[in-house]
Amino acid sequence: MATAKSPRGATGIGGAKGSKGSSRGGGSSRFRGAVRSIGRALHFPVTGTARGIRRATHAHGAGESGLGKLIELHGVNGAGDVMITVALASTVFFSVPTDEARGRVALYLAITMAPFTVLAPVIGPLLDRLPHGRRAAMAGAMLARALLALVLSGAVVSGSLELYPAALGVLVASKAYGVVRSAVVPRLLPPKISLVKANSRVTLGGLLATGVAAPIGAGLQAIGPRWPLYGAFVLFIVGMFLSFSLPPKVDSAKGEDTALLAADEGHLHGPHRQPVKRPGLRTVGPAVTHALAANASIRCLTGFLIFFLAFLLREHPLTGQSAAVSLGMVAVAAGAGNALGTAVGAWFRSRAPEIIIVTVVAVVLAAAITAAVLFGALLVACLAAVAGFAQALAKLSLDALIQRDVPEQVRTSAFARSETLLQMAWVFGGAVGIVMPLNGPLGLSVGAAIVGIGWVTTVRGLLSSARHGGATRPRVA
C-alpha cells in the first residue's frame, strides 16, 4: 500500500526546522520591541514635557481661540531675549573691571537707549496703523532679532562698534514685538477667560521660559561667547514660524479705532459718558491714565534698580557672597516676585483694580523706604521681590481697567500705546540708576522718591474712580 505523504511541516524534521525559524522570528521581534521601548524611554522626557506644556497652554479654551499658540510664542520670545541678555552682560558688564564696566554700560545706554527713547513713541502708533499685518510684524521682529544675533556673535568676540547698533536693533525689534503682542491678546480671548487672566497666562509663560533659558544661556556662555547668540538665533527662527501659526483673526482690525492716552473730558468716551463729536478721536479716561502713571512709577523703579543694583552689588556684594552670586540672588528674588504677582493677578481677575494699584504702589514705597533706612542684604533682596510682584500685579490691574473702561473699538490701540509709555519709563529709570553714586541708602532713597511721586499724584484719582465708577461698571469674569 502506498503510504500517505505527510506535509513537510508535519514531520519531525520539518517540525524542528519550523520551530527553529519561529524561535528566530520571536527573538527578532523581542529585540525590536526592546529597541522601541528604549527609544520611547529616551524621548519621553522631551515628548512628555512637550505634551504637558501643550496641555497647560491650551487649557480652558486657549487652544481653540489661538491664545495657547501666543503663550508658546511669548515663551520662545522670552527665551531668545534672555540668551542675548546673557551674551551682552558677559561682554559689556562682567568682562572688565567695575569702573570700566560702568563707563561701558553708560556708553551702551547712550548709544542704544537714547535713540530707543526717541523711537519707542513712534513704534506703537506706527504699528497701530498697520493692524492687518500683525502676524507679519511679529514674524519680522523675530527674524530681525535672529539676524542681529548673528551680527552680535561676531561683535562680542571682536569688540567692534557694530555691537551697539546691533543691540539697538534688538531693542527696537523686541519693543515692536511687545507692542503687537499687547494688541493681539484681545483678539484671542477664549469665551471663559478674562483679558486680565489671559495676559497673566501669557506673561507667566514668558517668565517660566526665561527661567529655564537663563541657566542654559549661562552654560552656553561657558562654552564660548558666541554660543548664547547662536541659541538666540535658533529660538527667534522658531518664533518667526510660530508667528504665522497664529489664527488669521489676529490680522483683523474690524471695529477698531485709535486711542488717545489723555483724560480730556471733552472727548471722553466710556461707560456713562456722552458719545464724542469727533468719531476718530477717543480717550481712555481718568482712571486708566492715573493707573498708567502709577504703573510708570513702578516700571521706572524696576529700571532704576536693575542698573543701580548691578553696579552696587558688584562693588559691594551681599555679605559673604561674590558679586555674581549677589546679582543672581537679587535677580531670582525679582523673578520670583514677578511670577507670584502674575499668579495673584490671575486669581484676583478684575476685582477692584484701582484699590489693587494704590495698595501695591504703597507697599513698594514702604519697602523702598525701609530698605533705604535699614540698608542690608536681606532688605535689598526683599525690595527686588516686592518690586517684581508689584510690577506684575499693577500691570494686570491696568489691563483690567482698560478692559473695563475703554471701548472695544479702541482697546487694542490703548494696550499698544500704554506699553510704549511704560517702556519709556523703564528706560528713564535705568538712565537715573546708571548715573547714581554707588551709595546704597542714597540710591534706594531716590528709588523711593520715584515711587512716592507716582503714588501721591495718582492715589486720589484712583480712589475717586473706585468710589464713583467701579461699583456701577460691569465686572468681567
Image (cartoon, rainbow, N blue to C red):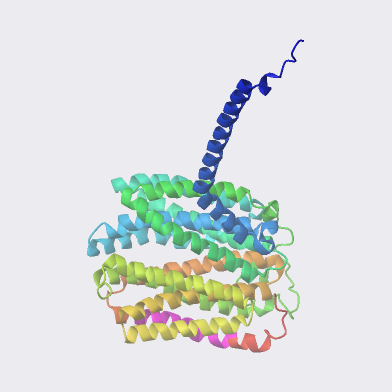
What number of labels is visible?
A: 0
Residue 332 in picture, x, y percent from top left: 40, 69
The range drawn in magenta is: 443-462
Q: Quadrant of the C terminus?
A: bottom right
Identify the residue shown where x is 45% and y is 53%: 170
As for residue 451 lying within the magenta part, the answer is yes
Identify the residue shown where x is 35% and y is 78%: 380
As for residue 419 lying within the magenta part, the answer is no
Vertical relation: 60 (above or below) 72: below
Residue 54 in picture, x, y percent from top left: 60, 56
Residue 100 in picture, x, y percent from top left: 24, 61
Which is more toward the observer, 399 or 67?
Answer: 67
Question: Quick check: 289 left or right of 213?
Answer: right
Identify the residue shown where x is 55% and y is 53%: 48
Could you tell me what secondary structure mostly forms the magenta stretch? Answer: helix
- Residue 160 seen in the figure: no
Q: Quadrant of the N terminus?
A: top right
- Residue 406 seen in the figure: yes
Identify the residue shown where x is 62% and y is 70%: 197
Residue 153 in picture, x, y percent from top left: 37, 46
Q: Which image quadrant for residue 410?
A: bottom right
Q: Which image quadrant for residue 451?
A: bottom left
Which is more toward the observer, 471 or 331?
Answer: 331
Identity of the residue furthest to the front in this view: 1
Q: Which image quadrant for residue 406?
A: bottom right
Vertical relation: 250 (above or below) 463: above
Question: Quick check: 168 left or right of 412?
Answer: left
Question: Quick check: 253 left or right of 242?
Answer: right
